[in-house]
Amino acid sequence: MRDLLLLAGTAEARALAAEFAGIPEVRPLASFAGVTADPAAFSIPTRSGGFGGVEGLAAFLRTLEQPILIDATHPFAKQMQLNAAEAAALTKAPRLRVLRPPWPSRPSWIAVPDLQAAADALPGGARVLLTTGRKDIAPFAARADLDCTLRTIEPVPGLPPHITPVIERPPYRLAAETRLLGQGFTHLVTKNAGGTGTAKLDAAEALRLTTIVVSRPPPPPAPIAETVGEAVAWLRQIVANGP
Ligand code: NAP
């Protein structure tokens, strides 16, 4: 029996966890950062909270039996994906990054390297829907000349008056996104998360809004699986061949 540590926080992590039931050679444990107060139930045992950097994660892996590490954190979980790669290298644990492909660019998009560049690209007076996440609002909070709406899964305390919160959980449907963005918005700001959640992109395009898309951080070293199916195939091969 081998221990499998799954770094979670995405739909892929959830789907992978369900697949582990069919691989009896591994004993899985899913890890969450602990930032969501009310995470939905998971099909395998879970733990919560940071490990304490690369050394902390390496120390955790050393407590496990022949550990395997699957990093299915969000494509923008820049620190965690690096920590996972380094800790796996230190402990010689096999490691896989699960990384769905980014959305292909569209003509109505402005691609920017980071959130500050996204804020800089917005003209004064713009009415903006921000879907970038709650820890990424500082560059927009500094722009009191914008009229922003911030959509998050959980409330964000201390927003300035020019940022109006909207609390909503996915999935977001095209009709609802079109209704929301049709209320006088001029811009959509999003990270290039990839995946099936494209309704906001489709709605913004149909309404002829400008979409500002933050590009991804560089990927970690291989191996990388783009889909849950690829990740399962990798895992089966590791389990069959070791180490
Ligand atoms: P991050 O900046 O890459 O990581 C910051 C720190 O959070 C890490 O150094 C680690 O702390 C801890 N951490 C992150 N993921 C963890 C996990 N699965 N288990 C245990 N500790 C974890 O990550 P982030 O962007 O803040 O994302 C945090 C979580 O939210 C991730 O699980 C990610 O999948 C999810 N998420 C992120 C986004 C996004 O846009 N960034 C969107 C949706 C979901 P230590 O160094 O102490 O180990």
Image (tube, rainbow, N blue to C red):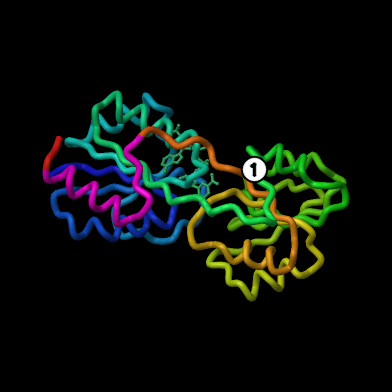
Q: In this figure, which residue is indicated by the disc labeled 1? A: 136
Position of residue 123 in the picture relative to residue 227 (left or right):
right
Q: Residue drawn at (76%, 70%), measured in percent from left and top?
A: 182
| Relative height, residue 33 to residue 201 (above, below) | above
Residue 188 coordinates in the image, percent (x, y): 71, 56
| Image quadrant assignment for residue 17 | bottom left
Report the front residue among 235 and 154.
Answer: 235
In the rendered image, residue 223 lying in the magenta stretch gets the answer yes
Position of residue 146 in the picture relative to residue 1 (left or right):
right
Report the front residue among 160 and 11.
Answer: 11
Q: Residue drawn at (58%, 68%), measured in percent from left and top?
A: 172
Q: Residue drawn at (65%, 73%), measured in percent from left and top?
A: 176
| Relative height, residue 18 to residue 156 (above, below) | below
Residue range in magenta is: 222-240
Residue 230 coordinates in the image, percent (x, y): 29, 52
In the rendered image, residue 23 lying in the magenta stretch gets the answer no
Note whether ligand 1 is within 8 Å of mark 1: yes
